[in-house]
């Protein structure tokens, strides 16, 4: 099933929905608990989709593809390298990525994002699937120049709008071999398969849960394949994952108020 959040009017509370072909029905209840599907009465193209969830914590994994680690001249780590992005960095499909004035080297990182559905701690890889609600596309936008200046990446990874997600949560995906691509203005920049992850999805979920309790609505961004590159004012960036869909966002320089 594909789970969306739709906003019927500006400023209104988003409603849960489910997608079938190009139709959407409302979900009564919550996908993190009990829910009932209503008939698919809306046409998808006319709807305003917002981020498919407002995540709790966003745990990210660095250097999880050998070819991406190599393009920054580093080795793959012995254990998953974790960092966090703040929930305030989340935007939805079609929303604008803002280039902050503090950086002159913002880059795209296309990633598979795991949506946690059930609370868990000290999970094994075998137990992980029962705690996953589904998958969405995650875009780990990064201020590369600031990342290189800091030993902690909170600043480089944490700006508002630096975590586009969407367009929906796909509950049926097999995460072991899904193609991930990223293109900017129609030009292909990144292409890789989740089968090239150093630490595969279920191992990552288990590892993160050995440190912190995973809660429904938490998100894990699983690292990016090679080919990361610049995002510039006026660009249109598209991340696609086979079996999920496509997440598109315009890129604009941030104008500072005052
Ligand atoms: Zn990343």
Image (spheres, grey):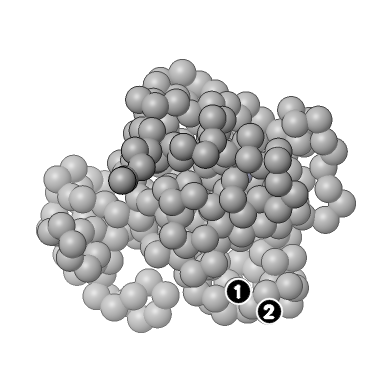
> Is the C-beta separation of discs 1 and 2 under 8 Å?
yes
- Mark 2, residue position: 121
Q: Position of residue 240 (x, y in %)?
A: 46, 36
* Residue at 57% in and 79% down: 119
Residue 41 in sight here: yes
Residue 224 makes an appearance in the image:
no
Quickly name the residue at label 1. Answer: 214
Judged left or right of residue 258, residue 127 is right
Task: Classify mark 1: helix, strand or loop.
Answer: loop
Report the side of 19 relative to 40 (left or right): right
Tag 2's secondary structure?
loop
Alpha-carbon span between mark 1 and mark 2: 6 Å
Instruction: Estimate the x, y position of residue 254 in percent, counting from the top left.
Output: 37, 38
Q: In the rendering, at what x and y percent does residue 149 appear?
A: 70, 40
Residue 54 location, x and y as percent?
Answer: 40, 64
How crowded pointer 1 is (Cα within 10 Å; few <14, some 14-19, many 20+) is rated as: many
Picture layout, residue 45 above or below residue 53: above
Q: Is residue 114 above or below residue 111?
A: below
């Amino acid at each position: 099933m594909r789970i969306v959040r739709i906003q019927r009017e500006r400023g209104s509370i988003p409603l849960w929905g489910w997608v079938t072909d190009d139709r959407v029905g409302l979900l009564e209840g919550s996908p993190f608990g009990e829910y009932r599907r209503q008939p698919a009465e809306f046409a998808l193209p006319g709807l305003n989709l917002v981020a498919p969830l407002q995540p709790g914590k966003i745990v990210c994994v660095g250097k999880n593809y050998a070819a991406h680690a190599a393009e920054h001249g580093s080795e793959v780590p012995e254990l998953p390298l974790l960092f966090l992005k703040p929930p305030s960095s989340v935007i939805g499909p079609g929303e604008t990525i803002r280039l902050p004035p503090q950086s002159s080297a913002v880059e795209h990182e296309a990633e598979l994002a795991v949506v946690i559905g059930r609370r868990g701690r000290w999970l094994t890889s075998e137990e992980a699937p029962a705690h996953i609600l589904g998958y969405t596309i995650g875009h780990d936008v990064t201020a590369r120049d600031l990342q290189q200046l800091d030993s902690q990446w909170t600043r480089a990874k944490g700006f508002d709008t630096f975590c586009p997600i969407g367009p929906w949560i796909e509950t049926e995906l097999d995460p072991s071999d899904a193609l991930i691509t990223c293109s900017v203005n129609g030009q292909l920049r990144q292409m890789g398969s989740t089968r090239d992850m150093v630490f595969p999805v279920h191992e990552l979920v288990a590892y993160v849960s050995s440190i912190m309790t995973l809660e429904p609505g938490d998100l894990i961004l699983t690292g990016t394949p090679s080919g990361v590159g610049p995002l510039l004012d006026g660009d249109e960036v598209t991340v696609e994952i086979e079996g999920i869909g496509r997440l598109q966002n315009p890129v604009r320089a941030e104008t500072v108020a005052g």
